[in-house]
Amino acid sequence: MKRVSAKILWFFSVLILAWQSRLLFWGWWSFPYEEGAFFAFLIWLFPLPWASRLRVSPLWFFLALIFAFLGMISTFNTLTYLGFAFICIALCPLRFVFVLHGLFSIAWMPAWGWIALHLFPEYVYFSRIALAILSSILVWVCRNLRKS
């Protein structure tokens, strides 16, 4: 019963944090410098089902809620989006590779679009996809190393 209630709590937390991140989803389709962010998000999500333990990690869950709360009270949306990223990886074990994967979630956030637009405007789309692929490959390789 305890595991089922934790998964239900996780599921509803994902829905709530997705709702809090709705500007992110809207921005993917509305702003030209957000080109490719949706695809970067899908690439970033890809290795998570194979890496998860199907148990909610309390620390990931706590970090997600803290970041989302700080983002909501400060109106600094990147913190809310980090909370959404951490709740997405809350089913994964707490390892350094998943901390990196959570931080690499900036590839699909508007903050990366803004940074890349000022540093290398011609490569915003490519840089998003490259960061997401790099992060996913890192998770995939570490997952396979752990098994062998």
Image (cartoon, grey):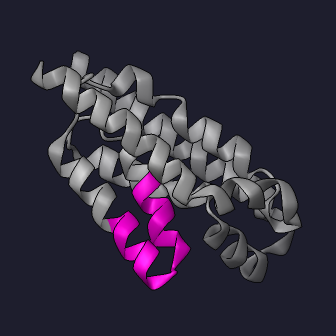
Q: Quadrant of residue 11?
A: top left
> Which residue is found at the position 52% from the left and 71% from the top?
78
Query: In the rendered view, would you say 84 is above or below 55?
Result: below
The part of the chain drawn in magenta is: 67-84
Query: In the rendered view, would you say 66 is above or below 126?
Result: below
Residue 91 seen in render: no
- Looking at the rendering, in which quadrant would you find the C terminus? top left
Residue 139's x, y, as percent? 40, 36
Residue 144's x, y, as percent? 33, 21
Residue 96's x, y, as percent? 25, 49
| Left or right: where 146 falls relative to 140 | left
Query: In the rendered view, would you say 79 is above or below 137?
Result: below
> Which residue is found at the position 76% from the left and 61% from the top?
27
> Which residue is found at the position 32% from the left and 45% from the top?
98
Q: Main SS of the magenta segment? A: helix
> Which residue is found at the position 37% from the left and 46% from the top?
87
